Image (cartoon, coloured by chain):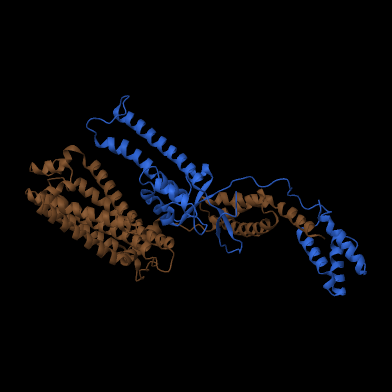
Amino acid sequence: MSESSRDHALKVTLLRRSQLWKKAADRTRRLVGKKTDDAADAISMADDYRMLAHDVAKVRRLLPDSRSREYLEAAYAQAHATLHRPAWHPGYALLNLFRDEIPAVVSWLRPHIVWATALFILTVIAGYAMVHTYPDLIALFASPELIATVERGQLWTEGLLNVVPSSVLSLQILTNNIVVSLFAYCAGFLFGLGTLYILGLNGLMLGAVFAFTSLHGLGDDLFTFVVAHGCVEISVMCLSGAAGAAVGEALIRPGAATRAESFQRAALQSGKLILACAVLLVGSGLIEGYVSPNPVFALWTRIVIGVSYWAFMIVLLNGWLFAARRRGRAIPAPAAP
Amino acid sequence: MDLEQGLVVDSVTGVDVALPIAGPGARSFAFIIDWHIRTIVSVAWYVVAALLHNGSLHITAPLTPDSAWFVYVIAPAAAIYFLYHPVWEVATRGHTPGKRMAGVQIISRQGGAPGVGSLLARNVFRLVDSFPIAYAVGHVTTMVTQNHVRIGDLAAGTLLVYVHDSAPPTGYSAEPLATNQLDATTAEVISELLQRWETLDSAARRRMAQKILAAETTDGDNNDDAILKTRLESLASRGRR
């Protein structure tokens, strides 16, 4: 029997299995987007995967440039993706995220958080010193409208609720803050420089505005406005900066892994902290919309709200909120990027 | 489709999974479809909600917009536009209507469906990819990177592959083999036996030939080597259609 005859017989036999491939592809399509409790279906899926692998290996040799190969390769890839889809239970995933993963990421990012906070504080001091010494420099950081309002002896926050309702104000603020936080994280892609820029600019602006309002006797009023929401908002800015710095460091010093692998690991790990930051900024936005511009709240009330919410942030990020559920489980350390 | 150009992923079966990677064209096509869908739905929401809110045939914002204007008109329209991709991708594990129409799908680098964290990360990095305008950064990176991925995919460890939903090959019936044809296993055994004929012990090859011939024909009762070989060759030729 010649080689070609043998191959021909194999091809014929292989192609007669097309109905089996179709059944396997149909089952994959059926299971790809939904869960099933049918054990027989799951077992059949695993059998299909083996059968497709067997036939793919044959078709690659016997019919390398055919539609049959194209069809089989696609069915095999789809079956592979379906079988390798990780299980996802939203409730458990969220609990796991806040109980174990975020505390682990915070622990891993601790040096970055320290450096990001130090940088932010230094830029706040620098901004304050600059504008306190040379008041005209406020034009670099604030809009002409804001400057004119302060020079009239008023804070731009006064009467804010007369212009915009609290709900809308909260929505605008929390959206803006989340976007800034995401930018600080994503900007880490520029080898950390983008993150440093965003962190530094925000620090300079905060210091400069405080100095300018202090020069016009409005420093205490600004502190009263900021204290309720600012504790967490500023902390989140530093945390986002730390996450972005980690992404940048992963690109600068990838270690044994390639830059792409290191970047991916750092982005996915520190991204978990960004999710927590976004959640915290929602609360911060609500406080800024409902409490901060409302003159009904006294200074001490604002301080209590601000410090309490900041303490809640610490508890949340360290996983102490779910400590009872952890029951002695060690916090797993994330893979070093 | 060139199956040689793509990602090759190890499988427990020992047979690699070949994934044809979607290029910038397919990605752009999918994005444009999705962009039209989210824009149309978002604008439609705005128009209908604004008409209902204003109670007249005007869709412009009132001079002093109230909470309802933002909560029922602006916020949902903005949410539809900006959350379209993350919501669709997370809900369907890597598909959007545009991607389905373009025949592409998001997968992890291991060939499986991507996790929720990866899908969220690739969407957060749209901030970088869309910079400075019209996804310029993302577009350039899909053109210059090996797997045609944008920065969001690099961060999330995902990529886009083609999903071919072609019909199975036809022209071969699913009926059992005709009585005068060999199945693949028998054809392979005969082929092997004939190839090794001269090297095998004569008693062994005779015994094997007789077994095969007895199973497939009524000619297995001969002890002559040459005749058995001729009959095997004749039997092997049945494989021809």
Query: Residue B94, how many percent across, how many down?
Result: 47, 50
Give the residue drawn at x 71%, y 54%.
A14
Give the residue drawn at x 76%, y 61%.
B185
Residue B93 appears anywhere in the view: no
Q: Quadrant of residue B226?
A: bottom right
Give the residue drawn at x 27%, y 49%.
A177
Q: Quadrant of the N terminus of chain A?
A: bottom right
Query: Which chain gets the blue colouring?
Result: B
Q: Quadrant of residue A293?
A: top left
The outermost residue toward the top is B57
Query: Residue B151, how many percent across, how many down?
Result: 41, 53
Answer left or right for B212 relative to B8. Answer: right
Residue A18 appears anywhere in the view: yes
Query: Residue A188, how many percent across, how many down?
Result: 33, 57
Q: Quadrant of residue A93?
A: bottom left
Answer left or right for A222 relative to A11. Answer: left
Query: Residue B103, how many percent across, how many down?
Result: 54, 45
Q: Quadrant of the C terminus of chain A?
A: bottom left
Q: Chain A: give its colour.
A: brown
Total marks in image? 0
Give the residue drawn at x 35%, y 45%.
B132
Answer left or right for B102 relative to B123. Answer: right
